[in-house]
Amino acid sequence: MDDNSGSNTSSSIHPLLTTESTCRCLSTCLKGRFWSLPSRRITQQIGVPFRKPVGQPRQWPAFAQLRAATVDATQKGPNLSGSPTPTVRVQGPGSEDQDDHKASLISQLKSIPQDTSFLRIEESTPSDKEWSILGEHFTNIRDLELDSGYDEGLNDKEMPLHWPLERLEISSASGQVIQTPFILQGRVKHLALIFTSGLRFEGPTNAELQRVNREAIERGEATPRYITLDEGTPAKRTIEVTYIPELVAQWMTDKYSKPHPQVESANLPPAQITTDTLEIVENDALDAFCRMAVALPHVVDNLKTLTLRSTHGLDFHYAKESMFVTVLPHLLNLQTLRLSVGDIFEDKEYLPNLYTKLPPSLSALYFRGPASLCQSKKWEKWIESFASKDYLPELKKLGFVLDLHYEGDKNGRKEVQAPEAVLREARAACDRLYAVAKDRGITIEPMRDEWADEFEHLRQVDDRWGAL
């Protein structure tokens, strides 16, 4: 599950060596240079941590409502009561030649009704053969969860398009190109990317990148790279390596350095875009959102509900930080924003000024940030802004918590529980913000992180916050 070596040819994406280029963002055609030079941060991407025990009911009021709106419960919608989810375990593309490749999956399907609407796939993503079997068996999949497992791969091109899919969750996948039209053409209403890393929404596959690089080496247009293993021992050997992130970065540079980069033909939007809800949780969440914005502007433009959670400091390897704060205010159809952002920006001005970048169309805002924000010189501007009826004029609901806290130097900052004195100061500062918002008729709502209820690795909103 490590993602910090940057030196193998597998699916795993690593801290990326990226270059400057211009990019087109959304339908507004943002101008400027948004791709970054290589980040020097020492980071380790986190794969999907342990989920809470299956037998433990999920207490997600807001999330349950979101799913209920996405999948019609009268048509065998997802079971939110905590009872077992229909689950199959697949072998994946690397095992297609095994004798039991088909039989292993077929035997699992005997106990699952063909008209079930909720399916979870674990241990890998299906091979093309496995997708075919699943497509022939199931007729009514509306809510699909794909957990790539420890191989972190993603093979989604043959995902059955006859399924009436309304919610798609992908977890663990790393360093791959998304190929399903459900995502690229905005066909699925609700998309969730959970602990993914380095996913791309356009461009060649890793195998295609490697092939082109090999051909360039053979023509003398590229230089092969080698590393030495077991140096100083009789087993010393040298092997050639391919740095996939560098090839990705070069492809992006070649595309976005052109005056008018085009949306790829596979990504061209249909007459009607269905995707209106997007969730990206941890690892390179904000970076992934930026990559989606340039590759799938038709999808991002259509969003009404957006959840972004980036609190672990593993973000911004492809995109510059400035790209995120440039894209955000242009989401003019966005109604609900759930933004959890920690002390993750290298430019210390971005977070204190984030209040100026929120889309004016918001009717509901749920913001979770670091306690240190209230110590910023800009904090009074936050108070003044929320007091003004001209600021976020459509806002009706507000959840706002500053309970995140970090310790350590810039190369090793770690999220820890905030000391009570720090938390108390942050709560007092937020009470002022609550008061001016209430004066505008805005309802102050309690904050709860639904994904922290799902994954043990994620820190829930501090339970001391409401008692201070």
Image (tube, helix red, strand yellow):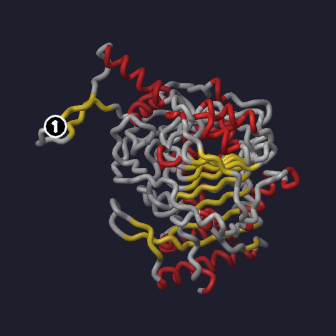
Q: Residue at x 48, y 40 (%)?
A: 175
Q: Quadrant of residue 450?
A: bottom right
The image position of residue 56, as x and y in percent, is: 66, 69
The relative height of residue 91 versus residue 74 in the rendered view (above or below) is above
Q: Which residue, given by chain and number where applicable, does mark 1 sit on?
A: 236
The relative height of residue 111 versus residue 215 in the rendered view (above or below) is below
The image position of residue 118, as x and y in percent, is: 74, 50
Residue 164 appears in the rendering: yes
Residue 332 appears in the rendering: no
Indicate left or right for 118 with 311 as reference. right
Q: Residue at x 35, y 68 (%)?
A: 408
Q: Nearer the viewer, residue 363 or 16?
A: 16
Q: Nearer the viewer, residue 274 or 334?
A: 274
Indicate left or right for 65 with 55 as reference. right
The image position of residue 456, as x and y in percent, is: 54, 66
Q: For the residue marked with disc 1, what is the amino acid?
A: Lys
Q: Residues within 10 Å of mark 1 (few under 14, many from 20)?
A: few
Given the current orientation, which residue lies at the most extreme right position?
A: 74
Q: Residue at x 41, y 26 (%)?
A: 210
Q: Quadrant of residue 391?
A: bottom right
